[in-house]
């Protein structure tokens, strides 16, 4: 049975056709002419990624849909311009590399590495304004839009930030590409990815055993076959929530050798939970670009909502095109996910299912921190594997908020961080992230669970 979309999209899609729809979560720019000047300038600047890379990722995501790869997507909730520094970028890369090594080894399949970086600068907010001591100002919407400081000047939506965000994304991309091309990601040298502060981690011994085993296999293979070009190097792709549509539009381009339009600000944009309405501006924008795209799926989504969304975003059922990232919460996933899986399976639609065990598990502590409990994150992931196994569908990846820094933002994990530990190193601008140890621990748990779910 095919599903007819319940709304009429403008038949002529264009990079700006989203402007005919209701666009949620956009800032109010005071001066339209100033915004137009900034977007015109942005539209002349070089893109951040190429259509070749975008199509290569789409193909790889298609393979993940078939179970031939596993997606590891991770990074900050919100990047900041101030964090565009060498140690922060390379530490984040180190964590993702270590996690992927653990996963390749345990899952026995290639891991597709996608960073939440080089463009993750815009955030949806639950309210448009924030009030402190009787003063009301616009909410902070990420460095792409305004500043975090609670002053009228900082909170003003500033179009120049569109240019600055492009520049910071380019700086980040450039450094990541140079590190990866220069040998930093070479599997022969996993010691390059060691993080100084973690030497005494309770997980270090298990990780080192794994690294030694991989080193042995690599040497064995190369003794038989000689050095294998391209085999020991790893690739990185980028992703961000394509929230601020003026920015995305200005980086939507045609290229000489491929037909259609590409969003060349990132390889893999996603639609956040709050902006995924079928008749909204974000779905209108996303339906016309050729990138692989993802949608966050929250607990209020029913099959009636999801199936038309799939039809709007991937009418041709193209492999690799559509990823659904479910983020239900540990308490709710069991009651809401099964019927979505069943409906998509019944309709025979091709999607990549990915679990985000972070965003449904955010809570506030009594001392005022936004946190997440490691046990809830782990619990949601465990359930996700079981629910997919029971439905006969496949969990093909995970989407995590993490950092390579020694932060204390999520509670629990190998060192059992408690509410009082949050005071020590809480640095996140928005949501609490897994620190290095918690990330590595989760990677190990994913492997154990995935292997157990397969053999059950
Ligand atoms: C996020 O990924 O930071 C986010 C806001 O997620 P969601 O749209 O799932 O709430
Ligand atoms: Co977040």
Image (cartoon, rainbow, N blue to C red):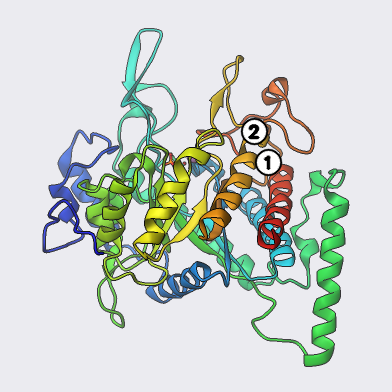
Of 280 and 150, the residue lying toward us = 280
**Disc 2 target residue:** 410
Residue at the image position 86 percent from the left and 66 percent from the top? 212
Q: Nearer the viewer, mark 1 or mark 2?
A: 2
Specify the label residue 404 is tagged with.
none
In this view, the residue in front, 354 or 168, is 354
Indicate the quadrant of ligand 1 in the picture. Answer: top left
Q: Quadrant of residue 14?
A: bottom left
Direction from residue 411 to residue 303 in the image, left or right: left
User: Residue 388: in sight, yes or no?
Assistant: yes
Residue 35 position in % (x across, y down): 22, 44
Q: Position of residue 54 (x, y in %)?
A: 41, 70
Q: Residue at x 43, y 70 (%)?
A: 58
- Mark 2 neighbour class, 10 Å CA radius: few under 14, some 14 to 19, many 20 or more: many
**Labels 1 and 2 touching (C-beta < 8 A):** yes
Q: Position of residue 109 (x, y in %)?
A: 65, 71
Residue beneath disc 1: 435
| Residue 265 at least partly seen | no
Using residue 139 as the reference point, say whether residue 426 is left or right of it: right
Of label 1 and label 2, which has the lower sequence position?
Answer: 2
Q: Residue furthest top?
A: 134
């Amino acid at each position: 049975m095919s599903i007819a979309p319940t709304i009429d999209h403008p038949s002529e899609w264009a990079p700006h056709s989203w402007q005919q729809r209701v666009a949620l979560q956009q800032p109010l720019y005071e001066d339209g002419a100033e915004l137009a000047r900034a977007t015109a300038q942005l539209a002349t600047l070089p893109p951040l990624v190429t259509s070749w890379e975008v199509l290569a990722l789409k193909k790889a995501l298609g393979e993940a849909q078939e179970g031939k790869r596993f997606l590891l997507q991770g990074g900050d909730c919100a990047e900041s311009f101030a964090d565009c520094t060498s140690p922060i970028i390379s530490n984040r890369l180190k964590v993702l590399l270590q996690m992927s090594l653990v996963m390749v080894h345990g899952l026995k399949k290639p891991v597709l590495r996608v960073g939440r970086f080089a463009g993750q600068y815009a955030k949806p907010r639950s309210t448009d304004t924030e009030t402190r001591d009787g003063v009301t100002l616009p909410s902070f919407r990420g460095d792409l839009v305004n500043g975090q400081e609670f002053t009228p000047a900082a909170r003003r939506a500033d179009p120049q930030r569109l240019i600055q965000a492009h520049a910071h994304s380019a700086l980040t991309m450039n450094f990541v590409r140079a590190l990866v091309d220069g040998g930093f990601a070479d599997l022969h040298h996993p010691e390059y990815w060691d993080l100084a502060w973690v030497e005494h981690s309770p997980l270090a011994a298990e990780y080192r055993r794994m690294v030694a085993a991989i080193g042995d296999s690599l040497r064995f293979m190369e003794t038989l076959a000689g050095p294998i070009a391209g085999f020991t190097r790893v690739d990185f792709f980028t992703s961000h929530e394509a929230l601020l549509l003026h920015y995305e539009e200005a980086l939507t381009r045609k290229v000489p050798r491929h037909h259609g339009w590409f969003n060349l600000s990132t390889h893999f944009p996603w639609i956040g939970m709050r902006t995924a309405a079928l008749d909204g501006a974000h779905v209108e924008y996303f339906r016309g670009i050729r990138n692989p795209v993802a949608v966050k799926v929250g607990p209020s989504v029913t099959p009636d909502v999801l199936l038309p969304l799939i039809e709007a975003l991937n009418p041709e059922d193209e492999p690799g095109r559509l990823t659904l990232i479910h983020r239900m919460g540990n308490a709710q996933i069991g009651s809401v996910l099964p019927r979505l899986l069943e409906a998509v399976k019944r309709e025979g639609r091709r999607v990549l299912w990915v679990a985000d065990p972070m965003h449904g598990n955010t809570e506030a502590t009594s001392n005022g921190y936004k946190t997440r409990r490691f046990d809830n994150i782990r619990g949601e992931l465990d359930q996700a594997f079981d629910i997919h196994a029971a439905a006969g569908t496949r969990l093909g990846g995970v989407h995590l908020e993490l950092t390579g820094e020694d932060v204390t933002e999520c509670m629990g994990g190998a060192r059992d961080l408690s509410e009082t530990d949050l005071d020590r190193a809480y640095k996140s601008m928005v949501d609490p992230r897994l620190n290095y140890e918690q990330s590595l621990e989760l990677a190990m748990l994913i492997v154990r669970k995935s292997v157990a779910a397969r053999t059950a």
